[in-house]
Amino acid sequence: MKIYLILATALCSSLIYSCKDKEPPIIPNEEELITTLSYTLTNDSTGDSKVFNFSDLDGDGGNSPVINVEDLAANSSYTGQISLLNESETPAENVLEEVLEEDEDHQFFYNSDITDLSVSYTDFDGNGNPIGASTKLTTADAANGDLTIILRHQPDKSGSGVSDGDITNAGGESDIEVTFSISIQ
């Protein structure tokens, strides 16, 4: 009986000791926190800039996000640039830098219910596939509607229509999805 007690004590001691020395597992490519997405559009003719901004500093739940949108001009062309930040850190972390470092594993998608609004890609990864942090946005007649911007992590960039901005066959997971209600005047 005494031998069983000694063995049980030794086993428990070795388990406790081995657990103390274990490091927490490293999670490769852990999803980054994105608190702020800004889409800056510069009118190619006038040089005027319009900014669509989404900010949710406390993340999911809690306070509602703050969304600001500026009107766009009809029959115009804009150069667009995305900005992604994690403003829960000081100083704020530029998350777009990490997205661009892992460009083959990311793609932005732009979906709109405005018929005459189009967004095309102007930046590409090392394989020639679109990223979408830089774009060309074109408007036609005056209209109101929504523009949804989605950052997809590990999309199938060779999927049917994906390189043209169709998210249907992209797969992967969304890192952030924001819908802006916009007005074209």
Image (cartoon, helix red, strand yellow):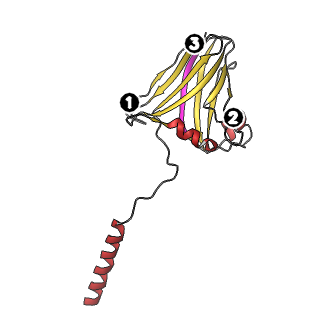
Q: Position of residue 177 (x, y in %)?
A: 54, 33
Neighbourhood count class around disc 2 (C-alpha, 10 Å): few under 14, some 14–19, many 20 upward: some
Neighbourhood count class around disc 3 (C-alpha, 10 Å): few under 14, some 14–19, many 20 upward: few
Neighbourhood count class around disc 1 (C-alpha, 10 Å): few under 14, some 14–19, many 20 upward: few
Q: Which residue is mark 1?
A: 63
* Mark with earlier residue (3, 2): 3
Q: Choose top left, top right, bottom left or bottom right for residue 65.
A: top left
Q: Which residue is mark 2?
A: 166
Instruction: Label 1, secondary structure: give it.
Output: loop
The numbered dot on residue 118 is none
Dot 3 amino acid type: Asp
Dot 2 amino acid type: Asp
Q: Which residue is mark 3?
A: 48
Answer whether residue 180 is magenta in the image: yes
Q: What residue range appears in magenta?
A: 175-185
Dot 1 amino acid type: Asn
